[in-house]
Image: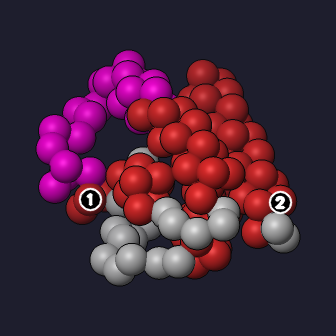
């Protein structure tokens, strides 16, 4: 979410409008998703992350450390969303094996959102 919001703030060039608008939709969706995922973690009796440091320590994506051009931002977001979709698919399968339909449903819904984001980002990338 933070990387997507950073791209939203810092994109420049001819793709400014589509990337600026899309990243705003994406980071707002991700904010809501984070809340839903944390609530599911709590419903399963676990502790949700308590700090940004805690979230980063559990993250599988890297933080952004450089300013990218618009195409670089799109490429990175495609990569990150594809990675998230794969992990969500794996987690949904694990939840299914354990008979946890609620988590499986949540993972599948998030996976669909990330796959849709990949499709839209790839559409912008061809501009």
Which label is found at residue 123?
2
- Nearer to us in this view, 119 or 41: 119
**Was residue 103 drawn as part of the magenta stretch in this picture?**
no
User: Does any portion of residue 31 appear in the rendered image?
Assistant: yes
**Was residue 47 drawn as part of the magenta stretch in this picture?**
yes
Judged left or right of residue 107, residue 116 is: right
Question: Secondary structure beneath disc 2?
Answer: helix
Q: Residue at x 26, y 51 (%)?
A: 55
- Nearer to us in this view, 43 or 11: 11
Q: Residue at x 47, y 52 (%)?
A: 8
- Up-down: is 94 above or below 41? below
- Nearer to us in this view, 52 or 86: 52
- The earlier-in-sequence mark between 1 and 2 is 1
Which residues are the magenta region? 32-55
User: Does any portion of residue 94 appear in the rendered image?
Assistant: no
- Residue at which label 1 appears: 56
Judged left or right of residue 67, residue 56 is: left
Nearer to us of marks 1 and 2 is 2
Question: Secondary structure beneath disc 1?
Answer: helix
**In terms of image quadrants, where is residue 82?**
bottom right
- In terms of secondary structure, what is the magenta stretch mainly? helix
Where is residue 89 drawn, in percent x and y? Answer: 68, 51
């Amino acid at each position: 979410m933070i990387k997507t919001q950073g791209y939203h703030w810092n994109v420049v060039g001819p793709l400014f409008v589509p990337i600026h608008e899309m990243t705003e939709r994406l980071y707002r969706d991700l904010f809501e998703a984070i809340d839903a995922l944390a609530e599911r973690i709590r419903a399963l009796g676990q502790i949700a992350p308590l700090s940004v440091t805690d979230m980063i320590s559990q993250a599988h994506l890297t933080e952004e450390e450089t300013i990218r051009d618009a195409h670089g931002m799109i490429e990175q977001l495609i990569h990150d969303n594809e990675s998230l979709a794969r992990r969500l698919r794996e987690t949904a399968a694990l939840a299914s094996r354990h008979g946890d339909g609620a988590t499986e449903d949540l993972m599948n819904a998030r996976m669909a959102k990330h796959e849709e984001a990949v499709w839209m980002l790839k559409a912008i990338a061809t501009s």
